[in-house]
Image (cartoon, rainbow, N blue to C red):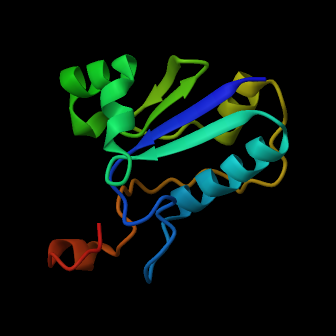
Amino acid sequence: MKKLEFFEPAMCCDTGLCGPSIDPELLRVATVVEEVLKSGNYVSRHNLKSDPDAFVTNETVAGILKELGIDSLPITLVDGKVVATGSYPSNERISELLDFELNSAPEPATEDSSCCCPPAASDEGTCCC
């Protein structure tokens, strides 16, 4: 079994699936996580806001953040090796990395959004993130 880990930007909750506007990319990742868990593979998500120790204690992730900064999030590891930085891997890529076919996850979103709040809320400083 493979070990899939996501080190994610600060979000209002562990999945980022809250608030009035849900980021389709985070919805896709949540669906992937559920399917990976059902397959018997190990998967974990680390939110910078609620689990900062995971970012500090993982030397690989800490090194990437020190070198590239916060824009390198999300960082994805498979069995401790970096497979993506700055965005989530596609469903196809995750399937390749874990050697099993993802069936129910929606296609990857094309919008770049790291916040679960609408852009207007973020600009006004009222975002929950």
Image position of 16 (left or right of 44) = left
Q: Provide residue 2's location: percent of width, then percent of height.
A: 72, 23
Query: Which residue sits furthest bottom?
Result: 20
94, 11: nearer the viewer: 11
The residue under the point 35% across, 73% down is 117
The residue under the point 79% across, 23% down is 1
The residue under the point 36% across, 54% down is 50
Q: Could you tell me which quadrant the C terminus lies in? A: bottom left
Quarter assignment of residue 102 = top right
Image position of 57 (left or right of 15) = left
Q: Provide residue 48's location: percent of width, then percent of height.
A: 33, 47
Q: Provide residue 100's location: percent of width, then percent of height.
A: 84, 31
Query: Which residue sits furthest left?
Result: 124
Total marks in image? 0
Quarter assignment of residue 24 = bottom right
The residue under the point 34% across, 33% down is 55
Q: Provide residue 25's location: percent of width, then percent of height.
A: 53, 56
